[in-house]
Image (cartoon, rainbow, N blue to C red):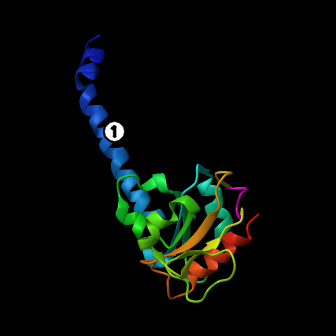
Amino acid sequence: MRVLRAIWAKLPAYVLWALLSAILWGWIFGLVTDAPAEKKVVVYIDAPGCRDTALDVELEKSMPEGIRQIRVHLFSYVMFDEAQLVNADLYVVPASACAGYVDSFRALESAAGEGCWEYEGRAYGLPVGGAASAWVDYDPGEEYYLFFGVNSAHAEDGAAQAVAESFLRLP
């Protein structure tokens, strides 16, 4: 009985140590498994749902040279950390929300063709047309567009372009 009372009296300390240990190992795991921005392409999708881990794996099958990771997230992933969102490489956004994010999008170098999303006479977004619908739950009443991030670490090296092309080819 004394042993149980001694354990019970120290239970808060044991729980605190367990929590601190979990946080420490989670942080270490994050450091080991994450890649710096120059080695990672990040895609944010503004849709009702997405099987992001499965889409990561699918996009990584055709990963550009020099890239270690491709990460896909819903916009809700960054609820309070807008800095992550504005530094993304690619965005998939419904037509109804495009104008609200236009400051985060890079204009396309050349008019990419019919169906592009335009703002003030410049083409910004490529039509998605249901690409990757096996992984992304698009809102059925919306058109979606793929945009390149204005702050992308891969604006010049072609990695974002390669991932965008892979995404648009997915069924």
Q: Is residue 50 toward the left or the right of residue 2 in the image?
A: right
Q: Is residue 147 toward the left or the right of residue 84 in the image?
A: right
Q: Is residue 22 magenta?
A: no
Residue 43's image quarter?
bottom right
Q: Is residue 11 visible?
A: yes
Q: Is residue 31 above or below residue 114?
A: above
In this view, the residue in front, 4 or 50, is: 50
Instruction: Give the class, few, some or many, for how many residues have Cα within 10 Å of label 1's Cα (few <14, many ≥20).
Output: few
In this view, the residue in front, 45 or 4, is: 45
> Residue 60, position in %: x, y?
64, 69
Q: Quadrant of the C terminus?
A: bottom right
The range drawn in magenta is: 131-135
> Residue 59, position in %: x, y?
65, 68
- The mark tally for this picture is 1
Q: Identify the residue at the far right of this view.
A: 171
In this view, the residue in front, 39 or 51, is: 51
Q: Is residue 73 above or below residue 115?
A: above
> Residue 17, position in %: x, y?
29, 39
Q: Residue at x 47, y 52 (%)?
A: 76
Q: Is residue 64 above or below residue 109?
A: above
Q: Amino acid at mark 1?
A: Ala
